[in-house]
Image: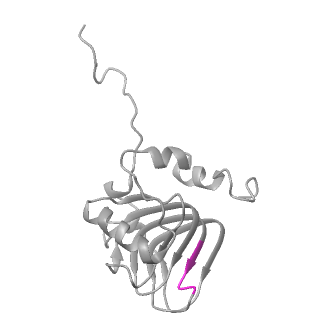
Amino acid sequence: ASSDPTCSNSAMFRTYFGVTMAEYAASPAVRTIPNCDQANTCGSLVNTALNDGWKNFYFPDGFALNSSAPFSSMGAAGAGNGVNIVSPGDIDINGNIEIHGLIFSNSANFNDLGTGTADIYGAIVTCAAQRSNGNGTISYDSNALGGPGLRPGVMARVPGSWRDFTP
């Protein structure tokens, strides 16, 4: 982080994920959800993506959830059942919400209003700031971080594996 004090070039993200934030966002296994920086609209956008089976998310404009969301949890306990939440912007979670997985942002606030119990099981990585207030918990859980559900992957050609032409 000392080489990227403003978090503008995502050096910390690349350190943890092995790819740039742009490469992560472009992965076919990642659902990008823009305009999710307001809790009153973000909940329904995320709920639709969860119902469609998405587990890896990129929020280019930030991510905000509160108790008005149409669901109370993202991800589930157990290996391979967690979610990835990635944003270069702010993450703001308030209310009674449970998240299993990995959260990465340049700034993260949990229960900042002191309402509810936003419980995070997995890990949080922030480049700049993290603030937690209220009764929620942040608990490291390696099971929420592993398994096929959290490997977005990058499509790459494997030599000798296939041909897209007729010899």
Considering the whole magenta stretch, tell me its main secondary structure: strand
**Residue found at the far left of this picture:** 166
Query: Residue 46, percent across and down?
Result: 37, 67
Question: Residue 111 colored magenta?
Answer: yes
x then y, percent, for residue 138: 50, 79
Tell me which corner region of the image, top left, top right, bottom left or bottom right, holds residue 33: bottom left
Q: Nearer the viewer, residue 113 or 5?
A: 113
**In which quadrant will I find the N terminus?**
bottom right
Q: Position of residue 53 (x, y in %)?
A: 27, 60
The one nearer the camera, 44 or 165, is 44
Is 14 placed above or below 122 here? Answer: above
In magenta, the rendered stretch is 108-112
Q: State the quadrant of the C terminus.
A: top left
Q: Is residue 147 above or below residue 24?
A: below
Q: Residue at x 38, y 64 (%)?
A: 83
The residue under the point 28% across, 22% down is 162
The x, y position of residue 144, in whole percent, is 38, 67
Indicate whether residue 154 is drawn in magenta: no
Whether residue 160 is situated above or below residue 2 in the rendered picture: above
